[in-house]
């Protein structure tokens, strides 16, 4: 709307236009707040997903270390069993 057209409008028309614009501004502000909240929620979800991935990696390392310890323990048990068995075999041979 041009300036000339605005000057021809009555005060009532101008007030109605102002009221409509105010409603539109409020609606846009509410929409902006909603979008901001959605963005923040998405950021939180991304951060949590990153934290979960990091925790999974740490757990994998813990499980790997536990598996290595279990393997080493079993190997020691086998070695001890062989030593014991060899010792008994030597005693029987004497």
Image (cartoon, rainbow, N blue to C red):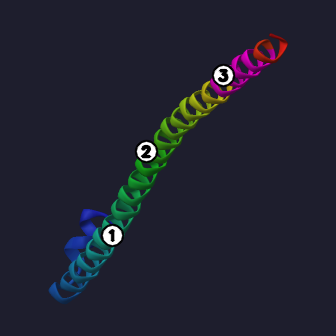
User: Is disc 1 placed on a helix, strand or loop?
Assistant: helix
Q: Secondary structure at mark 3?
A: helix
**Vertical arrangement, residue 23 with respect to residue 48, above or below:** below
Magenta-drawn segment: 76-89
Q: Where on the picture, by quarter, is residue 38?
A: bottom left
Q: Name the element at disc 2.
A: helix
Q: Nearer the viewer, residue 48 or 12?
A: 48
Left or right of residue 62: residue 88? right
Residue 62 higher or lower than 16, as above or below: above
Tell me the residue at 70%/21% (across/down).
84
Residue in view at x 47 percent, y 39 percent: 54
- 37, above or below 82, in the image: below
Residue 42 inside the magenta-drawn segment: no
Q: Which mark is residue 80?
A: 3
Question: In which quadrant of the rendered image does the N terminus lie?
Answer: bottom left
Label whose residue precedes the other's in the sequence (3 or 2): 2
Disc 2 marks which residue? 51
């Amino acid at each position: 709307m041009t300036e000339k057209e605005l000057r021809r409008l009555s005060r009532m028309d101008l007030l109605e236009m102002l009221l409509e614009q105010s409603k539109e501004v409020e609606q846009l502000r509410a929409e902006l707040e909603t979008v901001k909240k959605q963005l923040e929620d998405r950021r939180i979800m991304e951060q949590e997903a990153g934290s979960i991935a990091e925790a999974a990696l740490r757990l994998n390392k813990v499980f790997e270390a536990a598996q290595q310890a279990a393997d080493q323990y079993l190997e020691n048990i086998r070695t001890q069993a062989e030593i014991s068995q060899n010792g008994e075999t030597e005693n029987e041979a004497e």
